[in-house]
Amino acid sequence: MRSALPLIRVQRRLEVPRRVSAAVSAVFILLSFAVAALIFELMGVSSIATFGVIASVFTNPNLLLQAILRGLPIGLAALGLSIAFRMNFWNIGAEGQLYMGMFAATGVVLLHEYQGLIAEPLVIVFMVLASFVAGGLYCALSAALKAKMGVNEVLTTLMLNYVAILFVDFLVYGPWRDPKGFNFPLSIQFPDYARLGFVMGSPSYEGLAMLLVVAFLVYGLMRHTTLGFEMRVVGESPEVAKHAGISYAKALIIGGFISGGLAGIAGFSVVSGIIGRLRPRASPGYGYTAIIVAFLALLNPWLIIPASIFFGGLIVAGDLIQASLKLPFAAVQIFQSIIFLFIIAGEFMKRYRIIVSWR
Amino acid sequence: MTLEKRLTRRKFLGVSTGAAAGAVAAGAIIGGIAGYFAGQSTAPTKEVTRTVTTTVAGPAQTVTKTVEKPVTEKVKAGYVYVGPVGDFGWTYSHDLGRKWADARLANVESTYIESVPEAEAAGAIETLLAEGYELIITTSFGYMDATAEMAEKNPDKYFVHISGYRSGAAGNAPENMSAAFAEFYQLYYLNGLAAGAVTKTGVVGYVAAHPIPEVIRHINAFVLGANYAYKKRTGKNIKAYVNWLFSWFDPGKTRTAAVSLIEEKNADVLAFTEDSPTTLQVAEEYTTQKGKQVWSLSHYGDMTQYGPNSHLTGQIVNWGPLYLEFYRMVATGTWQSVDIWTRIGDYLPWRWRLPVEKSTAGKPEGTVYLAPLNPAIPSEWQLEIKRRYEEMKELLFEPFSPEGNLDQPIRDQAGEVRIGPGERADHDMLWTMDWFVEYIESELPKV
């Protein structure tokens, strides 16, 4: 008997060629624009005008610099995540590692300000190093738990996010509060030597350079070093790795350290480049957006740069849509969510094929 | 006798200064109107001037003579909001203020960006500047640094930051940045009087956002007022409890905090600093459904509709006059950096007090005013609230003084005297307040 309802099965694709994967992403982004356009039309706003406004983010130099600046923490964290994901280490904790990076970077500034332990020109270097180590150790904790005791890393990394956020809250509401800040929960303002932005007055230039250097290093690490090879093998199959004499735990912990460390540097870029002091809830979710960016870029370090700037641009476009088209924030959220949703749907379509059959 | 004499003297002073001020004001108004029309007639663009000269009609003739420089364009004002305009609290009140000011100056065009995370303020400001907005008004404490930074980068644009402490006038920001705030602590004291007058349990609660000086001084003012009324009624000290949210807008957490103050601490009046009517709604539920009269207040806007049976009074703001002032400065090229702090009596057409029976307490006026007073407040306390409200218009009464505490010095929780006989809290003390008055049982989250 023929059933009235079709049978829908979801089947895992075995191998996805890179070209197909890129094409699927492109198609889904275009689809998301089409749906967004439809919604804008329904709200009574010309979709052409809207996309004109959005495009202007990438043509107006000031706004483009802003897009790069917003994309900077997202991109750095996504570069770290690309390493973790290649190892099949599902690090959802970039947000928390980012906060640990902010904590360490601020700590270095305070050490210099109150103890004078570090020479002034070196402060920014130490900030980067400290944030890398802090974020790295925070992630390595989850990696070690997985490697040694088999604890699911999704749970530990996700939950440690809240620990890190509350830890930073504790510092700025407590011991790190600016003594001259009228008791508001803020650290002291960073002095100029601790701020990005010494090239042509905008932190975006250094930010772009940082992204390029880090992408180059990540690419080199994964493609041209033994460690990178080991990490990739661990990601493909822990069994094979074991038989090949690769230490699963070592690769996982080192990879986790680097992954978290890059998220830590993203935290440095937030306090030093964007805000200029430590404050509670300083990141509006850069670490989570980085997950989407890493997948959109197919975990390719070079593609992460344009993808993160694209997402940074979307945030700026959200402001612009409100200011120039007088649309409410809800419209911006719908627009951004549609794009996110379609990208995630595209990821699903890359991995699985849907088979509809009539019994 | 002496009192009588003092009063007459003050009355005389009031009338004479009133008359003098009236004369000055009348002059200013006439001048202002004349200037306004003159300003308007200089406003049109060159093309308009050309058509005017060809038609040669009416009052526009003067235009051709007065236009020397081309064209002042519209004041373009861009606002950055921290919440959605529909929050019925903080951001809603700013948007009402924006509309109020827009309606009173023909030559202005304004827009806003809402729900901007505090870390992303610089981007929102950059966007507004790129769109040609020249007066940027940022309405959250967390935008302060970003506003100052952008002010430094754009010396030809104007910046106003609400609720912070950085401005050119204060010397810690560029000259093109001003600070402004509509301050509520006097109103919270009056709310406290109302609370102390109606509480049956002798316990008041406070649902508080963040442990920062602004909120702490509002809590202290509220509790001082409540103690004043309650002690005068019963001879006993009030007990007060505070629950912290660590958030400005969180209806879910607010509900839990309010319920716990009622259930666990036995509070029957709840004040709050949170940008939604949730606390009042919880009070209304207890009053109408659970058989326990619980009172609460309006915050930033009149919230009576959310709790008609539980609405005592409350603190309401109109940001409009402040915004209008900045619009005018930009429109007329008379910008100067200011650090404005408005209280009861500011931005009124006159600022002397009215007799109690004619008091405007509970009616819209100025930038900060009381929500309607519930008739359930006993009449002698209604009069007391009105008397204090009117006195504060002339700053004759200060809540943070022994006079506001039944002539006792104001002590903190450790028993230390913070405001002794003959003293009043000054701006710096209010702005850095990090201690609770003795009647509060909860601890202040601290280092």
Image: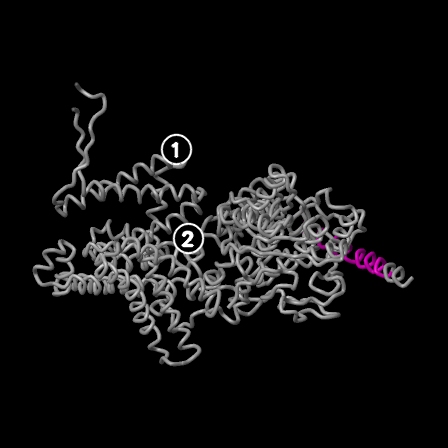
Q: Is residue A165 visible?
A: yes
Labels in figure, total: 2
Residue B15 percent coordinates (x, y): 83, 56
Q: Quadrant of residue B277?
A: top right
Residue A143 among magenta residues:
no
Which residue position holds label 1? A42
- Quadrant (top left/top right/bottom left/bottom right) for the C terminus of chain A: top left
Nearer to us in this view, B445 or A284: B445
Q: Chain of mark 2?
A: B
> Could you tell me the amino acid type at mark 1?
Leu
Q: Quadrant location of the N terminus of chain A?
A: top left
Which residue position holds label 2?
A: B127
Q: Is residue A319 left or right of residue A22?
A: right
Q: Does B13 lie within the magenta span?
A: yes
Q: Secondary structure at mark 2?
A: helix
The span picked out in magenta is: B9-33
Which kind of residue does numbered mark 2 sit on? Thr
Q: Is residue B37 rendered to the left or right of residue A237? A: right
- The percent coordinates of residue A261 (x first, y second) are 28, 65
Q: Position of residue B231 (x, y in %)?
A: 74, 57
Q: How would you rate the neighbour count of disc 2 (Cα within 10 Å): few for under 14, some for 14-19, many for 20 or more?
A: many
The span from disc 2 to disc 1 (Cα, nearest Å) is 25 Å
Q: Residue at x 22, y 21 (%)?
A: A4
